[in-house]
Image (spheres, grey):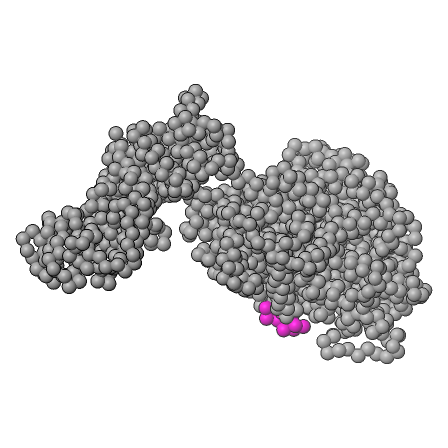
Amino acid sequence: MRKTRRGLAMVTAAAMTVLLSACGSKEGAPTTAAPAGTTAAGTETKAAETKAPEGGEVKAPETEVPAGDMSLDDLIKAAQDEAAAPGAGTFMVYAPTSRIAKALDAFKETYGIESEYYNESGQDLYTKLTTELEAGTKDTADVVLMQDSYLFQTQLVNYDYVTNYVPSYLENDIIKEDQNPLICYYYNKLFIYNNTDGSSGITNIWQLTEDAAKGKIFMKDISKESVNKNFLAMLTGDEWSGKIEAAYKSYYGKDIELDEDCPNAGYQFIKNFLKNVTFGSGDGDIATELSNGLGGNMGLFVYSKLRDDSVDQSKLNVVAYGEPQAEGFSGFMYPMYLQMVSTTDRPYTSQLFIYFLMTEDGFKSAFQTKAADIGTYSTNTTIAPLEGDKELTFWKDCLVIEDPIYLPEAYAGGVLDFITYCTQ
Amino acid sequence: MPEIILKNVKKVFGNQFVAVDNLNMVIEDRSFITLLGPSGCGKTTTLRMIAGLETPTEGQIFIDGVPVYDGEKGINLPPDKRDVGFLFQNYALWPHMTVYKNISFGLENLKWSKKEIDDRVNELLDMLKIRQFVDRYPSELSGGQQQRVAIARTLAPKPKVLFMDEPLSNLDAKLRGEMRTELKRLHVDTNSTFIYVTHDQLEAMTLSTRVCLMETGVLQQFAPPLEIYQKPENLFVADFMGNPTMNFLSARVMGKIKEGLMLDLHGKTVRFTGEEVSCAQGADVILGVRPEYIAITDKGRIQASVYTTLPTGMETTVRIMMSGELISAVVFGSVDYPVDQEIRIDFVGDNIVLFDKETTKRIGLGRLVVEG
Amino acid sequence: MNKTSNRVKAFFSKPANVILVVFALLLVLLTLYPLCELVHHTFIVHATDATVLPGLKKGELTTASWKKLLTTSTHKYSWINFYKPMVNSVVLATLSALFALVFGGAVAWLVTRSNLKAKKFISTVFIFPYIMPSWTLALFWLNMFKNPGVGTGSPGFVYSITGLCAPEWFVYGLLPMVIVSGLHYAPFAYIFIGGILRNMDANLEEAATILKTPRWRILLKITLPIVKPAILSTFLLAFASVMGSYAVPVYLGSPVNFYVLTTKMKTLQTTAIGQAYIIALFMVILGALIMMANSLLTGTRKSYTTVTGKSSQISLVDLKAGNYVITGLLCMVLFFVCIMPLFSFALESIIIKAGDYSLSNMTLNYWFGSAGSVSTTVGDTGIMRDPAIWSAIGTSLKLSLCCALIAGSCGVVIGYAVVRRRGSKLSQWVSGLSFFPYLIPAMAFGAIYLAIASNFSFLANSFLILVLVGTVKYLPFATKSGTNAMLQLSAEIEEAATIFGISWWKRMTKIIIPIQKASIISGFLLPFTSCMRELSLFVMLVSSRTQTLTTMLMTYNEKGASQYGNAINLLIIVLVLAINFGVNKLTGASIDKGVGGN
C-alpha cells in the first residue's frame, strides 16, 4: 500500500515538473497544482524516508523557498484558490494551545479561508501527528505549532515530517537565529516567590539547593510536562554546567565537589535541587496557591499566570527582576516552533498562515489579546512586549533555553534516568 | 389426522448427560398421553423435543406423517411449523399485555383477519369463563385465572396437538381437581391430541388414555393407565404407580408346579398360580401385592400385628407388621384398630405380580394361596 | 459432509447462535486485535525509543524496550519505572477494592437488613460518587485538607475553619488514594451486594435464626457465602478500575512521588513509548489474572442466582440506640463526599482570587460574563457564552447517547444470546471477550485505536471513531446489564411466542424488551454516564470539531484556569445527574438496576 503511494507521488511529481516547465513562468496562475518547489520537497521527503535516519543523527529541517519570489498578493490569491478548489481538504492546524482557535478565526476574517485545529498540550499531540503521518491520513495537520524541542527534533525533524518556511516578506524582522527552524514565539517559566514574609528572593541559584529551601520550591510535575524535563536536561550541557559551576564558586567561595554519580556541576545541581522540590499538578494551581501560601515559597511557572485574576500579584515577586539578578539563571524559556507539514495538500495556505502568525496582527489575534498575556515573545522583532514585560533579548540572557541538538544527546546519555532517580 | 411417531430419539446435553435415550413411541390421534416419571427422568425434554423447542441429538420425529425432525437428513422444523400448542408450567403469560392481547397476539401473527381474531378470542373467553378479566393484566389475576388465560392463549390457533408441561402444579389441591375435570372435557371438545407432562401418578391415572412412564431417560412402560396399574412391567413401574404403594415381599422359589410355583415367604409356603410363569428353582423373587389385595380377616392364614391406622374417611390404610416387614392394606370405610393388635391377614385377588429380583422384570401375574 | 452441513444449518437456525458467532467475530476484531497490536508495539522501536535506546532505528523489531524496562539497574531504573509502580498499583488497587467492598457492602447490609433511618436519602446519594468523574473527589480532598504544612501551603477548607493541619500522609499518598478510589467504587459493592441481599430469600436467614444461630454467625456462614459471587465480581470491577485510573494517582500520588502504572505509563509515553506499551500490557495481564481468578472462584455451579420476587417480610435487625448514631454518621459522610463537592465546585467557579470567600471576590463572569469581563490565560468570556463550550456539550451528549444506544443494544442482544446458550463454550467465550475492553487501560486503548483509525480516512478525526471506541470500551457494562436483564426473564416467556411462529425480531421488540424495559434502559445509562465523564479514552481522538466537555475541561485545567475548570466540572456532574434522574423518573430505570441491583 504505502509503496504504491510513494511510487505514485514520485510519478506525479515528475509529471508535474514536466508540466510546469512546459507552462513556463506562470507560477502565479490560478492552478490547483502545487508549486514545483513543494513537489520537489515532497519527493525528497519520501526519498529520505527510505533511508531511515540514525537514532542519534541530528537533522535540520529543510528550508522551503517559494518558487520564484512570489509576491504576498500572489500568495494570498494562491491560498484562496487552494481553498476554493474542488475537493480541497480541510486546512488543519495542530497546536498545544487552544488559543490557536482565535488565530484561525482572525485568519478567516482576514483572508476568508476556513480552517480547523486540534489542540493538546502533551505527548499526545506528537503521537497523534506522527501516527497520522505514518499512515498517510488525508485530514491530518497542514501546519503545526509545536513545543518541546526534544520531541520536535526526534519525532518530526529527524523524519522530515515538517518543512521549514520563512516568509520572505518578514525575513528581516524575524530574529536570524530563530529562523531555522522557524520559531513563532517563546514562552518563559520564571522563578517567582511569595514576598509576604519580606523575602527578597535569591541571589544565587545554589540557594535553592540548601536545606532551608526544602519543600519550599514548587514546579509542575516533570512527568506531566516535558518542557520541565528539558529544562533540567539542559543544565547538564557544557554551557550551563559551566555557569552553574561558576555560580557555586562565587556563592560558596570554593570549587564544587561532585558526587560519584554526577559527571558535572549541572548533574550535582539537579540532584541537590530536586530534593527540595515539590511537584504540583499545574502551573495555574501553583501560581494561585503560591500567592495564597507561605512567604518565601518559590515557584517555577509560566510568567503569564501572574496576571490571572485568581493570583494576587502584589504578593509575588519575579526573581529575574531582582537587583542584582540571581547568579546562574532565573528560569527557563522554550520555543514554539511553527512548521509546515511536509505532505500538506494546502502548501500556499500553509505558507500564508505561517506568514500571518508571524505578523503583528496574526500574533496578537491569539497570543496577545489582552494586557494579561505577558510571557509570550514573538521572534518578530517589530512586535513589542506588553507593558510591564521585557524584551525577548532580556530573557534570552537570563533564562535556560532548549537546544534541540543537545537534548537528544543528553537523553540518549541517560539524563532522564538520572532525573527520575533524583525525584525518588 | 395427526399421529406422532418417535423413532430412536436421543438427547444428550452438552456435558455428556443423556437426558433421553433411544425413545420409541407412537402417539395415536386424539389420544391423551401422559409423560410420567420422577423429576429429571427426561419427560419434559421429550415434550419439548416433540414441540420443537429442543433439538434432539439423533433419531426421527414424525407428526401426521411429516418428518419434523430427522437427524440423518437434517430436517428440523421450527415449532410454529408443527401446528402445536404449548401450555407452560408457569403459564408464561406476557406480563405487559392484557388478557385479550395475550390471547390475540399469536393470532395476529398468523395473519388472521381482525374479525376472525375477535370472534375466536370471544369464543375462548366464554369457553374458559374468563370474560370478566378481559382487560386485566396477568399480575392482577389469581393463579387459577392465569391458568385459564394460558389455556385460552394456547388453544386460540386451534392446534392439532396440545402440549402441557405440568400445568397444574402451581395450583392448590381444590383448583387442581377442578382443572383436571375441565382439561379432560376440553380434550373431547377440542378434538385434538394432548400430550401432558406430570410427576403425579394420580393425575396420569385420571386423565390419560395412555401413560408413558419414564425413568432416567429410558421408557419403562407405555400403556393405558389401568394396564400399568395392574400389569406393571417392572418393579419401578409397580412402585411408581398407585397410592399407597404396592407391597413388595421377598420370597424364594422352592419348586415348580402345574401353572405355577411354590414359594418360601418368610418361612411360610405359598403357592403362586397364574399365566406366563417361568423361573428357576432357588431363585430370589419379589411378590408385588397391591394394598387392596391384602385382606384382614379372622380366617387369614398369616399372623400379623397392626402398626398404625390411617383413615381418610372413604377408606382406611392399615399399616401392618408382618414377620418384621411393614406392609399396607386398604380397607373400605372407616375402621380403627388399636396399635399392636394381633390380626390375621390373607392374600386375595387375581393380580398379584411376581418379579425377578435380579432383573426387576415382571415374570408372572396371578393368585397367591398360603399353604401353611 | 451432508451431516456436517445439516448440523451447521441447524446451528444457525437459532438466533442466539447467530448472535454469538457474529459477536465473537466482532469482538475478536475490536478487542483481541487491538490487544495484539499492543503486544506488537512493545517490540517496535518508535521515534522516542530510538533516541533513548542508542543504536536502534525507528521501525525495527527489538526486545530492547523489555530489557531496559525490566532489567536495568543503573539509577535503579527498573525499580523506579516498573517494579515499584507495579507494587504500588497492586497495593492501591487491592486496598481500594477492599475498602469499596467493606464500605459499600456494609451500607448495603444496613439498608437492606436493618432498621436504619433515612434509607431513601442514603440509597439515592450513595451512587453519586460513581456518577461523578473520579477526579472530582481527589480535587475535593485536596480542597478540604491542604494546609500550610504540606505542598504550597495554601489553606484548605478544614484548616480555614478549624486551624487543624493534616499531616502530609493524610493529604497525599496511599491513604487518601485508597479512600478516594474506594469511595468512588463503593457504589459497585452497594449495588451488587445490595441487589443480592434484596433478592435473597429471607427464609434462608430465618431458617438459621430458628436454629438459634447467633446473628454474627448467620452473617458469616449464610449471608456472606451467598453474596460471595457479588463480592468477587465487585472486587474484580473495582480492582480493574482502580488499576486503570489515572486522575486520582496524578492528583494525590504524584506530588509525593507515589507512582502507579498509569502515571508511569503516561510519563514514559513522552520518552519511551515502547516501554509505556509494556506497562499497559502488564495492566491488561493483571486484570486478566483477576478475571480468571474470579471465574475460577465463581464457577457456573457456584453462582447462586437468587431471583424470584418472593422475598417476604424480612425481620430487620434493630440497631437500637446505635441507629441514630450510625444514620447520623453515614449521612454526614455521604453529605461530605456526595453533596459537598458540588457546592465546592460551584463556589470555586465564582470566586476570583482563590481562598477569599468574601462576596466582593465573587463573580458570575466565569459563567455568563461577556467578552473581556475576566482575565485568565485561556479565555475572557463566561463559559456559557463560549460557542466552543456549547458545541462541546452537544458533542458530549451526542457521543454519550450514541455509545449508550449502540453499546446498550449490543448488550441486550449479547445478554440474550449468552443466557439462552448458557453453559456452552461459545457463550462463555463471548461473555469473556466482551469483558476484555474493561481491562485495557483507556489510555492505551485510545492510542491503539488512533493507530487503527489513521489507516482509514473515514475514521480519522471523525465523530465515528469516538463512537466506536466509546462503544467498545463500555460494552462490558452493557453486556453485564443485558445478561442480568435476560437472566430475570424465564425462557418460557419467549417460547410461548415461538410456538406461534412469531419471528425473533418481533419476539425481542414486542415481548422481551417491553417486559425488561427498565432493566434494559438502565443498561443504557451506565455507558452513557461513563462516556460523559471519560477523558483519557478520547483525548487523542478528538479534533476541533469533536471536542467533548472533558477534553475542554482538561484544556482549562492544564492552563490553570481553575474557575473555568470547576464550572465545566460542575456542568458535567449536573448534566449527568439530571439525565440520570430524568430517565429514572420517566422510565423507572436507574444505574444500579443496570448492574444487577433491584
**What residue span does the magenta drawing correspond to?**
C70-78
Is residue B155 magenta-colored?
no
Q: Residue at the spot x=69%, y=42% of the render?
A: C578
Residue C596 position within the rendered picture, expressed as x and y whole percent measured from the top left? 55, 49
Left or right placement of residue B93 versus residue C244 in this view: left
Quarter the C terminus of chain B occupies: bottom left
Viewer-side residue, B121 vs B159: B121
At horizontal 19% and vertical 59% (from top left) the residue drawn is B303
Q: Nearer the viewer, residue C583 or C262?
A: C583
Left or right side of B334 for C314 = right
Q: Is residue C257 visible?
A: yes
Q: State the residue in front, C224 or A105.
A: C224
Residue at 27 percent of width and 32 percent of height: B30
Percent across and percent down for residue A5 are 57, 44
Q: In front: A107, or B73?
A: B73
Number of callouts in the render? 0
Against A180, residue A407 (above or below) is below
At horizontal 50% and vertical 45% (from top left) the residue drawn is C488
User: Where does residue C253 sit, x and y in percent of width and height?
Assistant: 71, 63
Residue C302 x, y percent position in the rendering: 46, 57
Horizontal side of A273 relative to B276 (left or right) equals right
Residue B7 in view here = no
Considering the whole magenta stretch, tell me its main secondary structure. Answer: helix
Q: Residue furthest left?
A: B258
